[in-house]
């Protein structure tokens, strides 16, 4: 006989897995620190590559000026500004990434909590049906 409650729960679970769960279930498999840490590592490399590309573009655009005036320029100050700009950009994007991925992680955990509650309810239904079918309690040396 078909258990309607079980079918309803399974339908809700399948709908979640195909909708919101597709985005949130992979996130929920990480610890918070691991998830955010991976995002920050990725952020570091992307900011570094992006900043290097910006510098390369500016160098190409102002190439003629740089070549004509390199002997007049204070290269220490230029190097300081380049490094300070990189540090400022890295700090800014690190803070934004931390906030974004923290919010994303908490939304995923909140969303997946209901999914796991439904799984627990389904598991209890299966346990009850198995208990009825076997006619005895849980296997082991004692009964509760």
Image: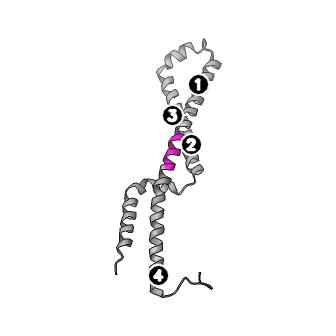
Callout 4: helix, strand or loop? helix
**Disc marking residue 50:** 3
Q: Are marks 3 and 1 in contact (CB under 8 Å)?
A: no
Q: Mark 4 highlights which residue?
A: 130
CA separation, marks 1 and 2?
Answer: 22 Å
Question: Please, which residue is most extreme toward the front here?
Answer: 144
- Of badges 1 and 2, nearer the viewer stands 2
5 or 43, nearer to the observer? 5
Pointer 4 or 2: first along the chain: 2
Q: Quadrant of the N terminus?
A: bottom left
User: Residue at image x 39%, y 67%?
Assistant: 9
Residue behind mark 1? 82
How crowded is the residue under tag 4: few (<14 C-alpha within 10 Å), some, or many (20+)? some
Residue lying at 48% horizontally and 63% vertically, measured from the top left: 116
Residue 104 falls inside the magenta stretch:
yes
Residue 79, image x, y percentages: 62, 23
Residue at screen point 37% across, 59% down: 18
Crowd around label 3: few <14 · some 14–19 · many ≥20 (10 Å): few
Whichever of callouts 4 and 3 sits on the residue coming sooner in the sequence is 3
Q: CA separation, marks 1 and 4?
A: 69 Å
Q: Earlier in the sequence, mark 3 or mark 2?
A: 2
Q: Would you place residue 55 above or below residue 36 in this image?
A: above
Q: Nearer the viewer, mark 3 or mark 2?
A: 2
Location of residue 7 by image quarter: bottom left
Residue 99 appears at what percent x and percent y? 53, 40
User: Nearer the viewer's eye, disc 1 or disc 4?
Assistant: 4
Q: Is residue 57 above or below residue 95?
A: above
- Around disc 1, counting alpha carbons within 10 Å, would you say few (fewer than 14), some (14 to 19), or many (20 or more)? few
Q: Which residues are magenta?
A: 97-106
Number of numbered discs on residues: 4
């Amino acid at each position: 006989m078909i258990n309607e409650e079980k079918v309803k729960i399974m339908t809700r679970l399948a709908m979640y897995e195909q909708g919101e769960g597709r985005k949130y279930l992979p996130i929920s498999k990480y610890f918070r620190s691991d998830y955010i840490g991976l995002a920050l590592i990725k952020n570091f490399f992307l900011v570094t590559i992006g900043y290097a590309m910006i510098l390369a573009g500016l160098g190409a655009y102002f190439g003629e000026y740089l070549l004509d005036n390199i002997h007049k320029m204070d290269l220490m100050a230029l190097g300081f500004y380049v490094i300070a700009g990189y540090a400022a950009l890295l700090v800014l994007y690190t803070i934004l990434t931390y906030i974004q991925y923290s919010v994303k992680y908490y939304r995923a955990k909140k969303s997946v909590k209901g999914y796991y509650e439904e799984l627990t309810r389904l598991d209890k239904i299966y346990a009850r049906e198995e208990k009825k079918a076997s006619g005895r309690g849980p296997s082991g040396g004692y009964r509760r």
